[in-house]
Amino acid sequence: MELRHLRYFIAVAEELHFGRAAIRLQISQPPLSQQIKQLETELGLLLFSRTRQRVDLTAAGKSFLKNAYSIMNLIDQACEEAKRVDRGESGQLILAFTGAIAFDLLPTILRAYQEVYPNISIILKQMTTAEQIKSFQKNAIHVGLVVMPVTSESLNIELLHEEPFIVVLPKTHHLAQQKGKINLANLVNERFIMTPRNSGEGYYDSIISLCQSAGFSPKKTQEAEELHTVVSFVASGMGIAILPSSIQFVKNDDIVYFPLQHNFQTYNTGVAWSKTEVSPVVHSFISFLRESIIPDCSRQILIN
């Protein structure tokens, strides 16, 4: 049995007239009658009762018609789904993210992307930039939102978003009541809470560079992998921290946020994907970021 047999059968069942069905199918009537006879022979039953005056469906024919509709609908759905997958409009995306991306940028991306691509199933994995690089090597993720700079010969990496650094102080700190920006040179004797360098070299080195430009190297008192943990340590009075400005989405009554003077460094978020990636879903996601997210982020940077 072939698909054309089902199409021919449905046409005759709906028209209840071989001549009209043949015109609808754009074939001549004899081949149509022959195809229906072949189908009945294969099934070993009559689908139609025929007289000179009329054609009617048999009880078996009515039952077969119901299932023929279901089969054709499934085939149509399969074809449409295949086309959506080929266009990158359906499928699965494993998306890794790190750091301050989770506070502002990631929710913005997810909301906008799901509006345009509701049939994409997104699996989120929180990882450090270093962990993402290893995961790409194992083909465990499709796309990564990383802290730049990142050097990798096997990955495509594009700048997605830039934001300034700010300083986070305990509310009881002697500088917590001042107005305006903090001069980094005034923090020379402070204890700094930082993330480990092996979690993200670019982020760590940016903070070191900022402090060194103010004439000192930061004294580390504690390390924490996650930025919200750094905020908690600051709130407990263990030290201060320099963090991306989007950390301000984390509300805590025991801390205060201040912009920095002479802030020449930025916290740069990039999007990374394998140079050998062939998934239409991945490439449609990258195109979406280029068209919808990166221009908006660029405008925000100019405004800020």
Image (spheres, grey):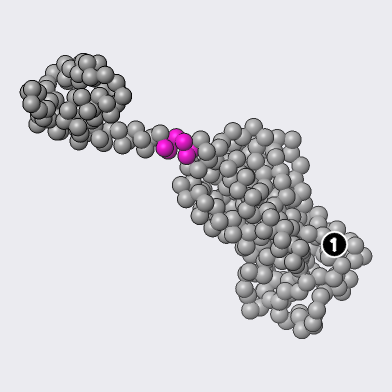
Mark 1 sits on what residue? Answer: 264
User: Which of the 4 image quarters holds residue 173?
Assistant: bottom right
Q: Above or below — where is 50 with respect to 246? A: above
Foreground residue, 3 or 241?
A: 3
Foreground residue, 277 or 131?
A: 277
**In what quadrant of the picture does the C terminus appear?**
bottom right
Magenta: main secondary structure equals helix
Q: Picture coordinates of residue 86 (x, y %)? A: 51, 35
The structure residue drawn at horizontal position 59% and vertical position 55%, both measured from the top left corner, is 109
Q: Picture coordinates of residue 55 (x, y %)? A: 11, 27
**In what quadrant of the picture does the N terminus appear?**
top left
Callout count:
1
Foreground residue, 163 or 212?
A: 163
Left-right relation of 61 to 207: left
* Residue 60 visible in the shown view: no
* Residue 170 visible in the shown view: yes
Q: Helix or strand or loop: what does disc 1 sit on?
A: loop
* Residue 127 shown in magenta: no
Left-right relation of 66 to 199: left
Residue type highlighted by circle 1? Phe
Left-right relation of 87 to 36: right
Q: Which residues are magenta?
A: 80-85
Left-right relation of 298 to 16: right
